[in-house]
Image (spheres, helix red, strand yellow):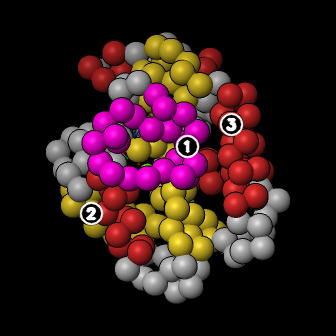
Amino acid sequence: MDASDVGNDLENILLTQEQLETRLGEIAAQIDRDYAGKDLLLVGVLKGAIMVMADLARHLHHPVEMDWMAVSSYGSGTKSSGVVRILKDLDTDLSGRNVLVVEDIIDSGLTLSWLLSNLRSRGPASVEIASMLRKPDAAKVDVDVRYLGFDIPNEFVVGYGLDYAEKYRNLPFVGTLAPHVYSS
Ligand code: IMP
Ligand code: MG
């Protein structure tokens, strides 16, 4: 799928496929170094993290296990409240494991900060975060992102796993939507 497949729904391409690819390669090299000789469990947060997880895992030389969690944050509209419900829990016991949470985007940071304390309560050896994108509001919550792709402006973005009303996840780049998509 490419920009031409979504008509005039996109306003702007924020990060190209090449930019995402290059940055993921750099992050993967960093992870390879940091976890050399250690076990590593990647925990992807469904559904947005699917693309980052798939591409990051393929860039790694380090052997990893992968598991998935699905969470839903109670809140009105597009803003999360920080009150989180687990829709799908991990299959893996975290005790003694090195966990790397893989996220698509950190906006308010509320979901992730809840997730971190939840995962830390399960007795892992370590829990770190890798996120492809981060918005400015994330700075308000004290969430330490160990591996970050890009800081982006405070705009609603789609593509590379990110959706608007479950659409646009399979665009290979990150872009902003044209206003008519929201208002229609
Ligand atoms: P928060 O950090 O708790 O506010 O929520 C982050 C989650 O909200 C992400 O994992 C996404 O699923 C979703 N989200 C936040 N910003 C965007 C966006 O610009 N486009 C698509 N989804 C977003
Ligand atoms: Mg997410």
Label 1 element class: strand
In the rendered image of this protein, does residue 179 appear above or below residue 41? above
Magenta region, residue range: 130-152
Q: Total label count?
A: 3
Disc 1 residue type? Leu
Q: Quadrant of residue 164?
A: top left
In the displayed structure image, the side of residue 24 where residue 164 appears, left or right: left
Which residue type carries mark 3?
Arg
**1 is higher (above) or lower (below) than 96:** above
Q: Could you say where residue 41 lies in the image, as x and y percent from the top left?
A: 62, 71
137 and 181: which is toward the camera: 137
Which residue is disc 1 drawn over? 148
Give the labeled residue for mark 2: 84
Identity of the residue drawn at 72% across and 74% down: 38
125 up-or-down from 130: above or below: below
Determine the CA span between mark 1 and mark 3.
9 Å
